[in-house]
Amino acid sequence: MRLSELSGKEIVDVKKAERLGVLGQTDLEINEKSGQIQALVIPSLKWFGLKRQGDEIRVPWSHIKRIGTDMIILDMPDEEEGNE
């Protein structure tokens, strides 16, 4: 799958039923040697994306459960581990 195909998809945590962001507004952590995506780095935003609330949420690629046509479904661990 190309990065352009991922752009614009909503990122949703299935356990919390919570929208975390849109892939076009996130950063990607990429392995320089292999070129594979290692994690999504999602900024914590407030006020409809206009004001930063705090730290970023780092989501390892292994927590991505499914990539659909409109959204990316995450299966995050029960305890909040923003920076693994």
Image (cartoon, helix red, strand yellow):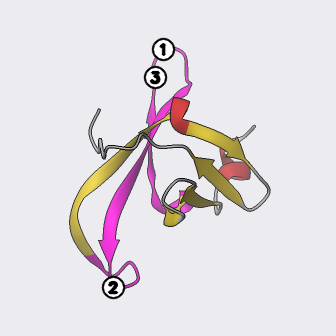
Q: Amino acid at mark 2?
A: Trp
Q: Secondary structure at mark 1?
A: loop
According to the picture, the residue beneath numbered tag 2 turns out to be: 47
Q: Secondary structure at mark 2?
A: loop
* Crowd band around label 3 with a 10 angstrom C-alpha radius: few (<14), some (14–19), many (20+): few
According to the picture, the residue beneath numbered tag 1 turns out to be: 33
Residue 10 percent coordinates (x, y)? 61, 63
Name the quadrant of the C terminus: top left
Q: What's the distance in space between the residues labelled 3 and 1, CA to CA?
A: 6 Å
Left or right: 23 in relation to 28? right
Say whether residue 31 is magenta: yes
Q: Which badge, 1 or 2, is on the more N-terminal residue?
A: 1
According to the picture, the residue beneath numbered tag 3 turns out to be: 31
Can you say whether 33 is above or below 75 in the image? above
- Residue plotted at (40% across, 83% down): 48
Magenta residues (range):
23-51
Residue 41 percent coordinates (x, y)? 39, 47
> Residue 3's quadrant in the figure?
top right
Left or right: 37 in relation to 70? left
* Crowd band around label 1 with a 10 angstrom C-alpha radius: few (<14), some (14–19), many (20+): few
